[in-house]
Amino acid sequence: ETPTAMASYKPKAVLLTGGAGFIASNVCIHLVQKHPDILFVVYDKIDYCSNIKNLSPVFRMKNFEFVKGDILSADLVNFAISKFRIDTIYHFAAQTHVDNSFGNSLTFTSNNVLGTHTLLECWRSNKEQVKRFIHVSTDEVYGENKVSTNIRKMDQKDGASAFEESKSMLLPTNPYAASKAAAELMVTAYMHSFQLPAIITRGNNVYGPRQYPEKLVPKFLFRMEKGMKLCVHGKGTPRRSYLYVDDAVKAFELILFQGEVGEVYNVGTKEEISVLEVTKAIIKAYGRDKEEDKWIEYVADRTFNDQRYFISTAKLDRLGWKPEIKFDEGLKKTIKWYRDNPAHWEPEALIGALVPHPRR
């Protein structure tokens, strides 16, 4: 079936939890601007890593509303669902930084597991009205790929080691990933017990404009801008697939309108790159590659650091999606955005984010 021949879902009012965060704010801006006939309501508590300025392009648009609230507050969630006649929940809200989860891991259980469970109960109170629940998860729920062969030949030779949505077990290796896996299990339990009309997404690392600089790419851009060395965990060997945020946005848009209830969709790219290669690419983008050794500082590794997540995106590809922006191009766009928006993050919001091992 071609994507156009598929039955498409037509929401009227979408609640985006965590909509002032990095990925969800980019999704929100795109959807609000492209779909003026649909109301998009952001529900966000404005935690340390989110930023109300992330939503400034859509503040004054007629089909956009903002509610400041915590997903753990069921009364406020229910009020928003009722007031705005929400028929679709797009659940992005989460604590997402692995480093933090090694320290203050209970907040991850509270936000990611109890927060998701609270939202599911809100759906249950409004199930005649809310017809779809899209749960945004992570590729980290799969744990670590054990096979590391020639990446480029992956599809032909070694496709069996790519994580597939329906065939791969959830074997998370850090408290963050475990909290996201637990949240997913609660979603699937509600699908079975209460016929929750849910879709689950599992995404690769995403980078681009509006990302809080505790994550690798923006942290290293900020450090370069400040003339600080780039702090590489361990030897920088872990490989990750980095998806530019605009490509991720198109995937989340497609899943909203064309995704099938009951399905799980991996969202990612086949391009894999090690942390050290990312570091060198950033140094090169700043024209400092002749003296790259001066800019790299190796620091203690994480408590545990998965070497690799490699996911199959065949199911999403069949809906007609493919990533278009290569890493070097996405990096240039990201650098330009951070340079054009130097005051986007308050100085106090950056304290603690730029250190090698953030802890909150």
Image (spheres, rainbow, N blue to C red):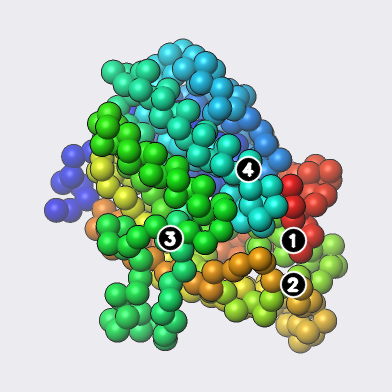
User: Who's the residue at 35% across and 84% down the image?
Assistant: 153
User: Who's the residue at 32% across and 62% down the image?
Assistant: 168
Amino acid on which the number 2 mark rests in the picture: Ala
In terms of sequence position, does the residue under pointer 1 or pointer 2 come before the other? 2
User: Foreground mark, 2 or 3?
Assistant: 3
- The residue indicated by pointer 4 is 106
Residue 257 place in picture, x, y as percent = 31, 40
Which of the 4 image quadrants contains residue 291? bottom right
- Determine the CA span between mark 4 and mark 3: 19 Å
Amino acid on which the number 3 mark rests in the picture: Leu
- Determine the CA span between mark 1 and mark 2: 9 Å
Whether residue 357 is visible to the viewer of this picture, yes or no, is yes
- The residue indicated by pointer 3 is 171
Residue 160 place in picture, x, y as percent = 29, 75
- The residue indicated by pointer 1 is 357
User: Who's the residue at 69% across and 47% down the image?
Assistant: 104
- The residue indicated by pointer 2 is 300
SS class, disc 1: loop
User: Who's the residue at 49% across and 72% down the image?
Assistant: 308
Amino acid on which the number 1 mark rests in the picture: His
User: Considering depth in this image, is 137 or 23 the residue closer to the camera?
Assistant: 137
